[in-house]
Image: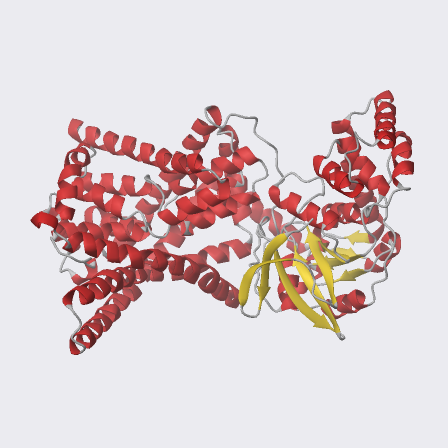
Amino acid sequence: MRFHFRVHGNAGFSDQSTTAREGETLLALAGNPNVGKSTLFNRLTGLHQHTGNWPGKTVDSACGRFSHAGRRYLLMDTPGAYSLAARSDEEVLTRDFLCFGAPEAVIVVCDATCAERSLILALQILEITGNVIICMNLCDEAEKKGIFPNTDRLSAKLGVPVVPMSAARGRGVDAFLHAVDNLTPGPPRPISLPAAVETACAPLVSLLESREIPLPPRWITLRLLEGDADTLAALQKQLGVSPEEDAALASALQLSREILHIHDLDAARLSDLCAASAAAEAEALCRECVRKSPSRAALRDRRIDRVLTHPVWGIPVMLALLALVLWLTISGANYPSALLSRGFSWLGTLLRDVFASLHAPPWLTGALLDGVYTTVAWVVAVMLPPMAIFFPLFTILEDLGYLPRMAFNLDGSFKRSSACGKQALTMCMGLGCNAAGVVGCRIIDSPREKLIAALTNSFMPCNGRFPTIISLIALFFTGSGLLGSALSALLLTLVILLGVVSTLLASKLLSKTLLRGVPSSFTLELPPYRKPQILRVLVRSILDRTLFVLGRAVTVAAPAGLLLWLIGNLRPGGVDLLQALAAILDAPGRFLGMDGVILLAFILGLPANELVLPIMLMCYLSQGQLTEPGALASLGTVLRANGWTGVTSACFILFSLLHWPCATTLLTIRKETGSWRYTALAAALPTAFGLIACLLVRFLSMLL
């Protein structure tokens, strides 16, 4: 079986198989979510896998290479998993690689602050291989909480090396590397099960021991009795025939099932029993090997949680934090945005002089400067400052450990909508970029709820929509100045809250119609509060998020700018295409409280939401190129001169919040769902909400 993952190297990354080069040792890195796997991976390989303080950060796998003491290793960082009884796509990926990917050793990263939970996965991995090293990570945080694991005693109990570590600070890494270099292959360590289960397994285990099978016979027997299809397929590949076609194997399997039936055990109850046995053994190990004493840090976390996750105060505190982040973003983005606009304007003038000195034809100057350059400059000037402020602030909340608390607060609302509480985390990612939010939906276990989260993520306004919404709020509702910024942040918070409510309504609608099903259960870990690492926050938020999203927007904006210039300047038969298209859309636009130019701008702005406002100005001013609002004496003057009122602005803001996603997000949804039908639904659903909202505002304004 071959596995394909994202493999990093010094020159970037590319898709390759995980086959180790000659002389390399293949190591698998496994563990629960949010235990520091990616931090250890980065420290060993020197690469920069994204790390964070909430579960489910690693939704992809990465490979890296490192050397020590003359030996070379290929390290696979698998997605976080709580159990090898896989429920999510990420846990399936981890389980399949550990069981069938043939790693020569497995490094299990455990959380010293919650060893009981982490050791469950370690015990399950020890069932399939004895070539294991356990890294008891986060020992520094455990000590602050009064938790002291005795790693020597735990190592003696498990029969494998157990290394105390704090990967973020580099403590224990040398001891870990020494353990890797000197790892001695050992036998698997089975989890103790009731005598009835052992009796039922005996016939099949005895038969499989006589066959050449790479995995332990007892582990395969338990998975077959649980009805695991992946294990069945792997066994069939090893044997060359299906178990049903192998008479001896089929007979032994039937006998084992009959013994289970005698003891009133079916596949589901056997699976629960295996999980319970692993949990009980992990708990017993911790009683013997982990000493706990009260600590001020643990009491402090509980006191903070009493406020942040309070049934009454949790939601208001969440909204206040969101309003503060938005206010800082709005207040801080104005000056650098204006500075960038002036810089791009100066550079544009310089480029125009260069083109003139080269006697470039007018069509080439227009296409490259008025089309491509002006569009890209507008996108960068508008998007970069808010992202450079919003993403670091958002990452600080993430590093603090607040995002899982937000999901906890909203879990009840999502449960009533037949959706998953983890969707709150993907919604937060959508505030930066809806495409990133859609990819983040992989952390949701249930395929149905994962699909609901992906289809509704665009109800959250992305960074490309923020600048336009903020500008219109300031122009028509709040004004400028310090008080105006505060009021703008408050109104923008209400707009985002409307997006949350719309997400819940849409999730409920989908769960009761096209995506009916039973809501699933899930484990939501509340990580400890941690002091943000400011330097890492800045580097990660700017490089991993800001520049990544900006680069994708520029890639889309450049060809879009050329297309817009062609539409605005080509006049077949003397017809102005922009004005003609706007005239066609004028009647439906006015019916929705807007006009034809606004609808046309939304349609032509499909490549990137940042283009909507400049396209409108291009049409209103009858120019053949995009116009930056910063270059105008007053944006409000232009809009009001073209019939804009408070109602028009309100309808525009609502439709900007609730309309089809950008092209990048739609393509991401297509990739994640593998269906054009669901992609079309993801575009139609928010648009329907937007049309209804605009009609309500228009008719209410007529009544009032």
Is residue 390 visible in the rendered image? The answer is: yes
Of residues 108 and 312, the one drawn nearer to the viewer in this rendering: 108
The quarter of the picture where residue 165 lies is bottom right
- Horizontal side of 477 relative to 71 (left or right) equals left
Q: Quadrant of the C terminus?
A: top left
Q: Residue furthest bottom?
A: 357
- Horizontal side of 376 relative to 201 (left or right) equals left
**Residue 662: x %, y % from top left:** 35, 47
**Residue 625: x %, y % from top left:** 18, 58
- Horizontal side of 327 relative to 276 (left or right) equals left
The quarter of the picture where residue 49 lies is bottom right
Q: As displayed, is residue 24 above or below residue 685?
A: below
Q: As displayed, is residue 700 above or below residue 394?
A: above
**Residue 155: x %, y % from top left:** 85, 57
Q: Residue at x 80, y 53 (%)?
A: 291
**Residue 480: x %, y % from top left:** 22, 55
Of residues 471 and 63, the one drawn nearer to the viewer in this rendering: 63
Q: Residue at x 81, y 51 (%)?
A: 129
